[in-house]
Image: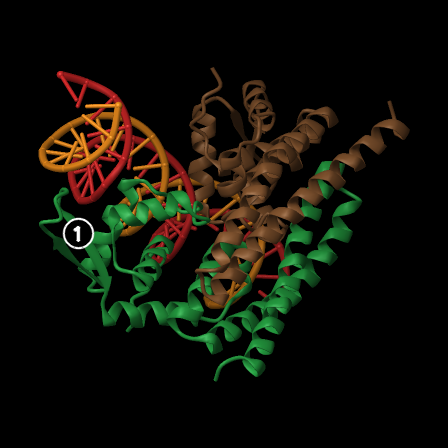
Chain colours: A brown, B green, C orange, D red
Amino acid sequence: MTSRNISSLGYALMGLLHQKPASGYDVRKIFSSTSMKSYSDSPGAIYPALRRLEKQGLIRGTVEEGTGLRRRQVFRLTPKGLAELKGWIVLPVTREDIVRRLPEIMLRFAFSEQVVGAHASIGLLKSMEAALKPYVQSLRQEGQALKSVASLSGTIAFEAGLRGAEGLLQWARFAIATYEKEGKGGPS
Amino acid sequence: MTSRNISSLGYALMGLLHQKPASGYDVRKIFSSTSMKSYSDSPGAIYPALRRLEKQGLIRGTVEEGTGLRRRQVFRLTPKGLAELKGWIVLPVTREDIVRRLPEIMLRFAFSEQVVGAHASIGLLKSMEAALKPYVQSLRQEGQALKSVASLSGTIAFEAGLRGAEGLLQWARFAIATYEKEGKGGPS
DNA sequence: GGTGGCATGTAACCGGTTACATGATTAT
DNA sequence: ATAATCATGTAACCGGTTACATGCCACC
């Protein structure tokens, strides 16, 4: 049933609203001031996206009155929205995700612990690792073939992509180790 | 004069056509089979993009006949297209580029040597390094502030971004060193 | 009384995604 | 014959970008 016609921005908004109910303006400030700068803070993107989510029953906006300022509409995640958000987070990670939608994967991981729980975070990380391993492998092979035909700048640009993927794999392993250490010594 | 209404895909196409004249189908194969998988190989994206470039006089298509197959239209970069491509490649790198358009920057670098020359490659790398240094700096600061308020998965996700930026900075320095070594010992 | 920040919105434009369609040639 | 591959295209849809518009409040 989980309707999959929600953009990356839509999920980012739902994740934020799960942490804390907020207005469109609040969200814009978060996007422009924190490390979520990769998302647009333009009103032309955010307000329509909030309306769409509301129309789908995933969030609900209530007008706050009497605060002295102009009317402010605060949005909250609905139970349906929470279910949708959870479903999105626990999706398995494909190679296609790694190649073309890495920021979205990172967003899913960033939200995972608060929204679904630490077990989901570990699950996501292992899924990422599983997708990354053969990907790095294939990149290394492709790199060998490339060296003989491409320009120096082409080869070095490819090297950046390879290093990025290798670094990501190392990061995933470090993250898994961190979580599993946490699980043993930490709170039940 | 350089018209800046060209999408990232448009420049990718021009870069490929500079290396070697090709048909839309050729380009689709390149996108789907090489490390340029981050670009879409869908005909609905590529053929209209080629038409747009042709309408702007940046590329020119000629129909190849008599090869036995169906008609094949091979596109070539025009002088105007080459100038546009060069202008795009040597643009300075901004922080905004790093945060939101990194793949495009990498594409510019990959093409730089063949299209403009090694001096342009070095210029791009130094521009990247200059943009990256303060960016990594600010990320580190933000990371400190984040640790106390975010969830573990949030903190670790941020760490991935930080490592990525640090790795990129190291890569840029390695690339600069490679080019400068090359310049001394290599061919005039 | 004007500037700047708070807060929300809309409309035009553009380009990528998806899906469908077509026709020719080569291999089985 | 017919399936697969070569090769090109189009149309609907959707959402992000850009730019503009509005109105309230606080402060100087």
Q: Position of residue A160 (x, y in %)?
A: 57, 57
Q: Position of residue B163 (x, y in %)?
A: 69, 52
Looking at the rendered image, the quarter that the C terminus of chain A falls into is: top right
Q: Identify the residue at image location x=71%, y=54%.
A: B142
Instruction: Please state if B35 lies on the left or on the right of D12 as rendered.
Output: right
State which chain disc 1 sits on.
B
Instruction: Please state if A50 lies on the left or on the right of B132 as rendered.
Output: left
Q: Position of residue A73 (x, y in %)?
A: 53, 35
Q: Position of residue B38 (x, y in %)?
A: 44, 46
Q: Nearer the viewer, residue B97 or A136?
A: A136
Residue beneath disc 1: B73
Q: Residues within 10 Å of mark 1 (few under 14, many from 20)?
A: some
**Residue A70 can be seen in this image:** no
Q: Nearer the viewer, residue A129 or A136?
A: A136
Vertical comparison of C5 with A45: above or below: below
Instruction: Please state if B10 lies on the left or on the right of B70 as rendered.
Output: right
